[in-house]
Image (spheres, rainbow, N blue to C red):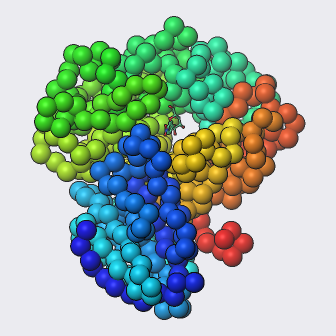
Amino acid sequence: MKPIDELMVIPESAQVYEHGWQSWSPTTTYRLSDTPWRPVSDRNRVICYRPETNPDTHAFWGEGLLAIDPGDGSGVRIYSVADAQTDVPSISVEVSGTRATVSASGPVVARTETTDIETALAGWADDFAAGAGVAELRRAPTIWCSWYQYFTTVSESDIIENIAAIERLDLPVDVIQLDDGYQTALGDWFDLTDRFESLGGIASRIKDSGRRAGIWVAPFLVAPESELARNHPDWLVSDGSSPVHAGHNWGQDLFALDTTHPAALEWIAEVFSTMHRWGYDFFKIDFVYAAALPGERYEHMTPVAAYRHGLHCIREAIGDSYLLGCGAPILPSVGLVDAMRVSPDTEPQYLPKDGDRSQPSVVSAMMTGRGRAFQQGRFWVNDPDCLIARPEIEGREEWAEHIRQFGGLRGSSDRIAALDEWGLEKTRELLSESPTDPFIPSRETK
Ligand code: 9PG
């Protein structure tokens, strides 16, 4: 990190905005006396933060974007990467008394706006989006997603039950989206667990009900015991001798697919074009941070360029399907996805189990979703994560209100039969619109 700027701050009134690396990385505005959110374990750091940087709490730290309001009315200073096509520097600010020192790991640009942090970020985002070539945004379809009710034990009959319930109740759901749980191993996307008969069959079933079919894929993660890892070890990002560690989830260590390897890319193109041919036209691509991990690749490319290369390939394979990013490096994805998960997962629990704000919980999702509200309608359509409204959800009223205020993509993820009257009405209400308009910061939402 190299010092790039110095400014005077008023410690009692100054604020710092930290932008996290990917969808699940904590992102919010702090007072100088606050302790910024950091991973509570190495495991969380790899999956939910930027693994190659490991800031402590002495400095505030943003990945490609950080803003300071010195608190003296002189204006908000935004430091950011000029564009995120090949690299995204880290930016930190260390405060000592009334002096703030800003440092960066690579080239950044700075601008000052005489307004509050969020209004300044919205203006910055307009310019960043224009630079990234963001075209007119496509309205998101409303979705029903299997994850937050069934998690990895979802079955074909669960999907069928909910299609029927949605039809019977005439709920305003455009897309039925099958989430994680159908595949035998990450990487082997056509090998199904015994709870599933056929992905093509499910798509037909959904389309017969007058709705569109959506599916979850974690295209750049590879399970060590998958056929893919066993047959093609050369398709993995490596540290020179073994595959790089891409995280630990589902009780296993994970590998990352090398998106610069032509044969690996061909496999990805085949997975997506086949699913598209089967009738899927809504894709949730998840854990895609894996393609941007540092390591050795077939072609010499920066991790960010390799990631973008992988995303281009998917985009090409799915025609004009709707593409939702998740677990995705935020700034490098601008211009490549239609919608983006801008927060950690919601959960039936209000607080994260381990106290880490990157981990699933209603508060984790609300904090970072709020911190990235300004991206809505500028970078893409913001996905605040699905509404879960069944009675057992802790803080369901607050969660629903967050979605109403900040949600561009509107989704439901309850077993419909588990909803009480309040839950059903909330689902109907929130799924009756899908805003694409840019989020305008205002006093009421602060
Ligand atoms: C499927 C899920 C859902 C969900 C995604 C993503 O830190 N973690 O351990 C962690 C686990 C799962 C997770 C996010 C973080 O959820 O956001 O909507 O698709 O994968 O496995």
Task: Answer left or right for 300 relative to 15.
Answer: left
Residue furthest to the right: 421
Q: Position of residue 350 (x, y in %)?
A: 69, 45
**Image quadrant where residue 124 sits:** bottom left
Task: Answer left or right for 138 relative to 265.
Answer: right
Residue drawn 39% across the image and 43% down it: 42
Q: Is residue 61 visible?
A: yes
Q: Quadrant location of the C terminus?
A: bottom right
Q: Is residue 113 visible?
A: no
Q: Position of residue 176 (x, y in %)?
A: 60, 30
Residue 307 versus residue 108 in the image, above or below: above
Q: Nearer the viewer, residue 315 or 298?
A: 298
Q: Nearer the viewer, residue 265 or 287?
A: 287
How many numbered marks does the figure carry? Answer: 0
Q: Position of residue 27 (x, y in %)?
A: 50, 60
Q: Nearer the viewer, residue 172 or 161?
A: 161
Residue 246 versus residue 303 in the image, above or below: above
Q: Quadrant location of the N terminus?
A: bottom left
**Image quadrant where residue 321 sits:** top left
Q: Position of residue 242 (x, y in %)?
A: 18, 30
Residue drawn 66% across the image and 29% down it: 149
Residue 9 versus residue 206 in the image, above or below: below
Residue drawn 22% across the image and 31% down it: 243
Residue drawn 24% across the image and 73% down it: 2
